[in-house]
Image (cartoon, rainbow, N blue to C red):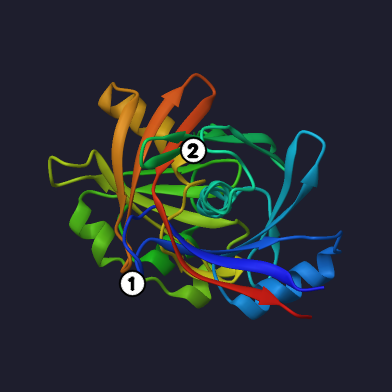
Amino acid sequence: MAVPIIQVNAFTAEPFSGNPAAVCLLTQSRDAIWMQRVAREMNLAETAFLGAHDDGFELRWFTPTVEVDLCGHATLASAHVLWESGRLPAGEMARFHTRSGLLTAAQKGDWIELDFPSTPAEPAQAPPALIAALGVSPRYTGKSRFDYLIEVDSEQTVRGVRPDFSGLSKIPTRGVIVTARSEVDDFDFVSRFFAPAFGIDEDPVTGSAHCCLAPFWSERLGKHEFMARQVSSRGGVLKVRLADDRVRLGGQAVTVWRGELLA
């Protein structure tokens, strides 16, 4: 039976920017081996698999090499597909049952707001090999549940990072966030995200990284709502709101193609 699959650019309102994710609408149960093969075939930062659940949808995320515990842009893409396709009525909250618990998404005008758990970083000394692979002088180093967090002196430094991906791939962590205050008034902070150990040298826009960035910048800027920009080559924009131990991630999304899996 053919399986619908849709590619969506997340955290952007423009095609061919933001972060692309494939959303696979399962018509029957499939095992993790098949999902991993599909994700490798799609060769995107994430492929999301949506299945039936008594109270919403089961949602799993795969990079080309591994299943992951949390992914923001593929969750945003999944919610967008559900509303756009009519599988979920307009205005009804999307409920996703995942390896990180229940996640929800709500329509906010032209934006979609995700409700994710906060994953604050604790101060931690980064491995010397990590700093060497980034080639930066950090102002701060920390570690969240998933990633290392590195603050540097300026947006220009963030934009100028040219990592040694081979070196980074040997660090035992999901990924590395590099961040600094924004140099323009439209945004509060900027970031980039590298995860070569998980098959993604640089992720274009990383929603889950902002679950760490929100509490970090809240402490430094004395506020709870932010406009954030991930300054990868594709780029993306997020509205970020810290609410106790949750982070609300706002983004836009656009469908770029639809097809069917025949295997």
**Residue behind mark 1:** 162
Query: As shown in the figure, which amino acid type bears the numbered disc 1?
Result: Arg
Discs 1/2, front = 2
Identity of the residue drawn at 30% across and 43% down: 228
Residue 111, percent from left and from top: 38, 41
Locate the C terminus and report the quarter of the image it occupies: bottom right
Callout 2 crowding tier (Cα within 10 Å): few <14, some 14–19, many ≥20: many
Secondary element under disc 2, as helix, strand or loop, is: helix
Image-based side of 31 in relation to 81, left or right: right
Question: CA gap, disc 1 to disc 2?
Answer: 24 Å
Locate the N terminus and report the quarter of the image it occupies: bottom right
Residue 237 drawn above or below residue 19? above
Callout 1 crowding tier (Cα within 10 Å): few <14, some 14–19, many ≥20: few
Query: As shown in the figure, which amino acid type bears the numbered disc 2?
Result: Cys
Image-based side of 93 in relation to 262, left or right: left
Image-based side of 256 in relation to 33, left or right: left
